[in-house]
Image (spheres, coloured by chain):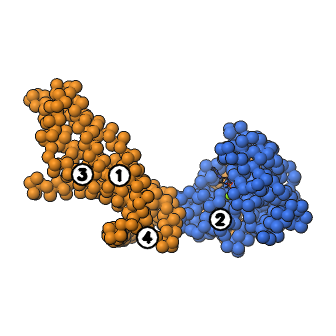
Chain colours: A orange, B blue
Amino acid sequence: MPEDPVSSPSDAAGSYHASRDTAGALVIRFLGRLAADNASSIIRELDSLLAAERPAMLIADLGELRQIDDFGVVVLVGLKKAMGTLQGRFEIQNVEAGVSEILAMHRFVSLGQEGGAGRRRSADIFSRLGARTIAALRETGYMLQFLGDTCVSSWHVIRHPRVLRLGDTLTNMQRVGVDALPIVGLISFLLGLIMAFMSAVQLQQFGANIYVASLVSLSMTRELGPIMTAIIVAGRSGSAFAAEIGSMKISEEIDALTTMGFDPHIFLVLPRLVAAVLVVPFLTLFSDLFAIAGGLLVGITMLDLTVNNYIDQTLATLDLFDVALGFFKGAVFAALIAWTGCLRGFQVEGGAVGVGRATTSAVVSSIFLIILSDSIVVVILRYWEW
Amino acid sequence: MSNTEAKAGLETKRPMSGEPVIQVREMTAGYGSEILLRRLTFEVRRGEIFVILGGSGCGKSTLLKHLIGLNTPLAGDIVVNGRLITGHEEVLPQVLRECGVLFQGGALFGSMTLAENVALPLREYTDLPEAHIDTLVKMKLALVSLSGYENHLPSEISGGMKKRAGLARAMALNPQILFFDEPSAGLDPITSAELDQLILHLNRTLGTTMVIVTHELASIFSVADRVIMLDKRAKGIVAEGDPRHLQEHSKNPYVRRFFNREA
Ligand SMILES: Nc1ncnc2c1ncn2[C@@H]1O[C@H](COP(=O)(O)OP(=O)(O)O)[C@@H](O)[C@H]1O
Ligand SMILES: [Mg+2]
């Protein structure tokens, strides 16, 4: 009987001994323990042993095995599978009661027979397209339903203003409006500064310095003020709405509201919607003012304009309609942001990942909606030649 | 050649050796200036099932978080597996690899399937080939009766299933010490009894030391070797020992009432 030289001292407490028996079968005698600490090294050694020997039959002799755990069972399953791919036979021998109890617990006999690892099924392109289409339709349906709910509950609040949760509304007004003042002011001021600076370079060549005031005030009041403010509000508050409502959704708080007889729309959506619509227009005016101040700074330090000059020119450029337009846009954008934030929050499913996705999507969709609706306004105004 | 040792280990009830694996010495715990547990001293022995009980809010979860080094005690020492963890954050990673923790809600990672949750520590801390990890993960999940749920996300299964999956993940590396925070809370009686069986079985076959926080009387009587009972007013241990003994013979009437389920 030719002794195979491979006998591994894989671990002080456990190893194996491989040899060929008279019938030519490869016999592996496991000694001591076969457990978490030595399983991986034994697996690697046996893998290369099998690859070299390619036996027609493999016998695992467990007679001298003192201790085995599920990692050890995995070693045996690995051998069984390997023999399956070699089209050979596999047998275990001399199984002691203790070991056999553990093998039985892990249903050793049935292990390793199901073949390939069950990965999440990846469907073909048509099923995926179909699934996506259905999902998109369903989402559109949900959005329409949500829009309907928002309209109905808004109407309800208009008829019975007392159902509006005043405390929540005031808190949200503070968080959306007051807390945003510093960042809106700073960004608008810098934006006004940059615009004045960039246009000054061009306008100076024609001695048209004074038109810097017109350019800054008109573009900020009609377009950039509302858009910048809305983007900041979407980033600060739209995302917060989605995250808050989304977390409430996954911890079943929204279900709790419903069962206690509250309308989640009136309870959660309307305070945020009303608060945003009330404060964002003012935030927009604030942004216009700071941008004009930024332009003013450039005007008097670099363009030899006086404060009076600059302000006169600004007042001459702007009419009430421009300011009102910015104000109105602020309200529309606010409604879009708050509504989208709440919608994404209500759509959350799953755990923390769902909340993260909702937050991202709230910001991205509201910015898209802001730009889209602004373009629509521009086209309409163009048509009526305002 | 027979494996008398393994047999002996499997057939006598517990491979208990009496050597302490966790020692808590004069430990004071609390949040901020509020002290919850004052000068606590006890030890957990290798191979035993040790139960921490007490009324809600008395600091059981807090104690557990101290034992696994998530919180630092205000005073005193904690030794786990022969290593002092208080004031020695550097030993924590090594100590924690020898421990498994089942959190109250399972604490599964929501973005991963159950199989990926269980495979995570295996991939990180062993160098088993991928195919073997797959087999092992299936075995671990089968052990907690979750065969067939390998590819489910945590959000797609029930609370009790999450707990069992959390247990499978905690057991992934066959730790020497398993910590459980209220394993049977929110489970139906049958599942809860099955979990007890599983705990006993793991303790018996692998010699795993178990530290369990629970209220469940039935479960305490069927698994616990030793209990300590904490009390909010006493800010410490009011009873310690074998629950069956305490039920009959405790001098403290509150303890007797607790074990006999009297108002
Ligand atoms: N992170 C924390 N900060 C402050 N206080 C806490 C914190 N966690 C728990 N507590 C307080 O500690 C006390 C005990 O909490 P805990 O250990 O969770 O009790 P239980 O025994 O029910 O598990 C409670 O009164 C709780 O309010
Ligand atoms: Mg607790």
**Residues at marks 3 and 1 touching, judged by CB atoms closer than 8 Å:** no
Dot 1 lies on which element? Answer: helix
Same-chain check, marks 3 and 1: yes
Badge 3 or badge 1: first in the primary sequence: 1
Residue that badge 4 annotates = A263
Dot 3 lies on which element? Answer: helix
The answer to whether residue B115 is left or right of residue A325 is right
Q: Amino acid at mark 2?
A: Arg
Dot 2 lies on which element? Answer: helix
Judge by depth and name the residue closer to the eye, A186 or B144: A186
**Residues at marks 3 and 4 touching, judged by CB atoms closer than 8 Å:** no
Residue B164 circle label:
2
Residue A334: percent from left, percent from top: 31, 55
Residue that badge 1 annotates = A234
User: How far apart, in angstroms, are the residues tagged by discs 3 and 1?
Assistant: 17 Å
Judge by depth and name the residue closer to the eye, B244 or A286: A286
Q: Amino acid at mark 3?
A: Phe
